[in-house]
Image (cartoon, grey):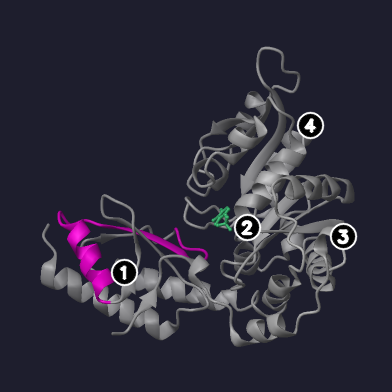
Amino acid sequence: MRKADFRSDTKTRPNAAMRKAMAEAEVGDDVAGEDPSVNRLEAMAAERLGKEAAVYVTSGTQGNLVALLAHCQRGDEVILGDKSHIVKGEGGGPMVLGGIVISTLPIDKRGMLDPDQVDSAIHADGTNYPRTTLVALENTHNAAGGVPLTPEDMKSVADVAHGYGLPVHVDGARLFNASVALETPAAELVKDVESVTFCLSKGLGAPVGSVLCGSNEFIDEARRWRRMLGSGMRQAGIIAAAGIVALDTMVDRLAEDHSNARRLSTGLAEIPGIEIDPDALPTNLVFFTMKYSNHDEIARRIIESGVLLGARGGGYCRMTTHADVTGDDVEYALDVISSTIRDYGKR
Ligand SMILES: *Cc1c(COP(=O)(O)O)cnc(C)c1O
């Protein structure tokens, strides 16, 4: 049976060039700073993002956690969006491991915070209130449908934070999707923020890892926390080598994922009973709702036919385009979804 996996861009597997680079990687003890491949990946990432330094971390979750631990003391507060991945998708790490207070503000349709609300929420000198020490944004915003935030968006929140002397962290798991969609260098997107993490293991197709970037001083502190969290990975050049290939060869091709997502979205919109916001499609995430009483059965049948999608309850679904799904896979998915709905859909 034909199979196409649209559940997540984390499903991408390392390609032949990555596997070759991994087999041939020069390595050393990264805890001592002696792994040439890790050092090269970190230097490339820092340069790409226009920051002084970078540290290779095991995952996007660890990148955000290490960043928050490096920015905040116990009892400090970070302000961020209520649907952000740091709040909803990372097991509460900053609270559990850092004693960091998470305060959320509502995000708008694009995943943006309202700068005025950020201004009112900041308590820079906490006695009764926890002391605010950080503001965090997400770009592209996963739960908001992968909308890329512009440099102006980022600056509008950063200006408020900086007015109180506070830094801004960006969860840029899909920052390169934003960069490609906006045809804006990633460094330009994050020029007004102090730290940013991005995933190598999503759309960029590497098997493992994320990179956290910031100032020299901040990255030294982040390294200390990474070590404490048990991620001194020794000969990590084996996996970093795939990250180098990802940064070298997998960024520009994200445009292909975005055009596949557009085609998918247009096709879905033509299927009766599928509700999809035609404006909400700038990158590689496609959210839609199946307006059928038996949506769970429909989703199950679609998945059984080899089109793997994320069914999130209530008929709400997510599909993701990435390097391991082709334009043909998109046509196949549209065929399977429309015929399943035609044959089994009950309003
Ligand atoms: C996937 C994701 C992460 C975490 O990445 P992992 O590598 O899965 O830990 C962080 N932020 C956002 C927005 C994500 O989509």
Q: Does the residue labelled 2 lie within 8 Å of ligand 1?
A: yes
Does residue 211 appear left or right of residue 36 in this picture? Answer: left
Q: Nearer the viewer, mark 3 or mark 1?
A: 3
Where residue 161 sits, quadrant-wise, is: top right
Whole-angstrom CA distance, mark 2 to mark 4, is 31 Å
* Of pointers 2 and 4, the one earlier in the residue sequence: 2
Look at mark 4 in the image and give the residue it sits on.
163
In percent of the image, x 81 and y 32: which residue is there? 165
* Of pointers 3 and 1, the one earlier in the residue sequence: 3
Are there few (<14), some (14-19), or many (20+) residues within 10 Å of tag 4? few
Q: Kindly identify which numbered label has been placed on residue 268.
A: 1
Look at mark 2 in the image and give the residue it sits on.
59
**Number of callouts:** 4
Q: Is residue 282 magenta?
A: yes
Q: Is mark 2 on a helix, strand or loop?
A: loop
Q: Can you say which quadrant of the picture contains the C terminus?
A: bottom left
Look at mark 3 in the image and give the residue it sits on.
32
Q: Is mark 4 on a helix, strand or loop?
A: helix
Q: Do the residues labelled 2 and 4 touch (CB within 8 Å)?
A: no
Q: Can you say which quadrant of the picture contains the N terminus?
A: bottom left
Which residues are the magenta region?
280-305
